[in-house]
Amino acid sequence: MKRSRKRDAALSETEASETGDNDRTGLFRPSPNPATNLLIADIVVRGASNLFRKNVEKRIAKASYEDDEKAIKALDGRTVLTTLGLYGASKLATRSPLGLGVVAGGLVLKTLYDRGRQRQRRRRSKSE
């Protein structure tokens, strides 16, 4: 019995959707349940972003501190309050443009404050 190409294509597409294989967009779907696929994607993306963030934090800490041990202590010595504050600031910055402006403005003010204190310390050490 001879089957048409359209019917074969429709059958193979149906079989692929039933087994969770690639769909017409070319994306791999591990589960036929869309909620499960979203959960898997969310876990993968969050895991990758956490690994990336930790790597960036380590590199910046090592570049900022003269000693690697001090850099590790700074990263490991965070309190729960600091962690919650960073989490809240990142959520605020990603939720709205206004939140991003508030967080970015706060970071600019903190940077200017730190530079001013460093300048004062240098002046005091030169005068002594």
Image (cartoon, grey):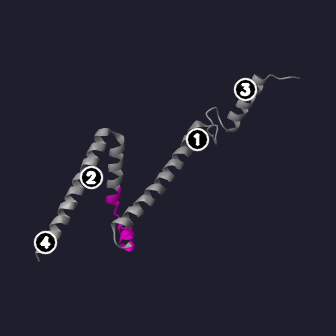
- Say few, some or many: other residues with alpha carbon within 10 Å of mark 2 (under 14 / 14 to 19 / 20 or more): few
Residue 98, x across and y down, in percent: 28, 39
Please identify, in this view, whether the residue under mark 1 or under mark 4 is nearer the observer: 4
Residue 12, x across and y down, in percent: 74, 31
User: What amino acid type should be assigned to the residue bearing mark 2?
Assistant: Leu
Question: Which residue is pictured at 58% across the width and 41% down the height?
Answer: 37
**Left or right: residue 25 compared with residue 62:** right
Please identify, in this view, whether the residue under mark 1 or under mark 3 is nearer the observer: 3
User: What amino acid type should be assigned to the residue bearing mark 1?
Assistant: Asn
Q: CA distance from mark 4 to mark 2?
A: 26 Å
- Farthest-out residue, left: 127
Q: Is residue 25 magenta?
A: no
Give the quadrant of the C terminus: bottom left
Q: Camera-side residue: 110 or 41?
A: 110
The quarter of the picture where residue 58 lies is bottom left
19 up-or-down from 89: above or below? above
User: What amino acid type should be assigned to the residue bearing mark 4?
Assistant: Arg
44 up-or-down from 73: above or below? above
Q: Which residue is mark 1?
A: 37
Q: Which residue is mark 4?
A: 124
User: Which mark, residue 107?
Assistant: 2
The reply to whether the C-beta atoms of the residues labelled 1 and 2 are less than 8 Å apart is no
Q: Which residue is mark 3?
A: 10
Secondary structure that dominates the magenta span: helix
The reply to whether the C-beta atoms of the residues labelled 3 and 4 are less than 8 Å apart is no
Please identify, in this view, whether the residue under mark 3 or under mark 4 is nearer the observer: 4
**Magenta residues?**
68-83
